[in-house]
Amino acid sequence: MPELPEVETTRLGLLPLLNHHVTQVVIRNGSLRWPIPQSLIESLPQQTLKALTRRAKYILAHFDQGVLLLHLGMSGRLRLLSQDVPPQKHDHFDLIFNTGQVLRLHDPRRFGAVLWAGDDPQSHQLLSALGPEPLDDEFSGYYLQQNMRTRTAAIKTTIMDSHIVVGVGNIYASESLFRARIHPQTPAKALSLDDCNRLVVAIKSTLHDALAAGGSSLRDFLSADGSPGYFQQAYFAYARAGQPCKICANPIKNIRLGQRSTFYCDVCQPLL
């Protein structure tokens, strides 16, 4: 699933559409995780795209009269294409702009979303209960400790909880915990303030490095212009089971936590 760096990379690739207006909406298959509103076919044409922002793993397209909420789901991609590029299988939704460019959603598994969020997107049910952005000042070691004081769940599953902090998915949780030298199975409430400060710094630095590399291209992800990301070349732990740790040469371990593969070094990340 695309995580925060991949979604932000996608958002940045769509910025050439700003200040242009929609001429046509095409819905080829509206049966995504939630049905694509058919009303978009009538309501979006002639509206100008004013801004593109991100909240968690959602891209918010701000138009004259409201906000379109876009989510990539498990395998979705948003591409910026020329209008003459023919649609392929799994190309479910197009926004055609007056420039001749097309914003096209490709989603083989159809777990993505195209939803109308109206004038107050932050009150939308998908956004209203989300935790802070991991790169914002609000997300601090003190905040993390205060919100984990009673949590017995493993720290890895805890930092992947979007009510605690958004956008830290499986890849970047494993990488951040490695950088912070924290075992992924450590109970969240067992972390000291120093541990939390170290983990927050690691999360922020991991995400910044991933953004600079254009995200991670595993399986399905390509940016809006079709370019791959390169952060996977810098992984310390994720998907490196059995390979030597880049710090101590001990083999990287792989366990299941919260039904997700979890990678770590039991020498560099001792269990508390």
Image: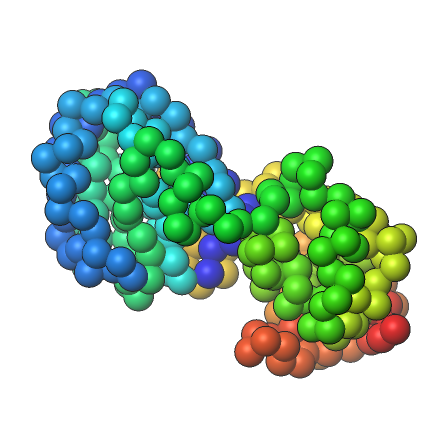
Classify residue 189 as left or right of residue 137.
Answer: right
Name the residue located 60 percent from the left edge and 43 percent from the top edge: 133
Specify whether residue 127 is in view: yes
Hey, which residue is sitting farthest top in the picture?
Answer: 19
Q: At 18% across and 48% down in the image, what residue appears?
A: 37
Task: Give the percent coordinates (x, y) of residue 22.
Answer: 19, 28
* Image quadrant assignment for residue 232: bottom right
Quadrant assignment for the C terminus: bottom right
Residue lying at 66% horizontally and 64% vertically, measured from the top left: 158
Closer-to-camera residue (233/193)? 193
Q: Residue furthest left?
A: 42
Does residue 226 show up?
Answer: no
Number of numbered callouts drawn? 0
Q: Quadrant of residue 53?
A: top left
Q: Is residue 100 above or below residue 160?
A: above
Relative to residue 106, is residue 143 drawn left or right?
A: right
Residue 129 in the image, given as x and y percentages of width and height: 50, 50
Report x, y in % for residue 123: 41, 41
**Of residues 229 and 210, which is closer to you in this image?**
210
- From the viewer's perspective, is 84 left or right of 179? left
Q: Residue at x 70, y 59 (%)?
A: 175
Asked if 44 appears above or below 177 in the picture, the reply is above
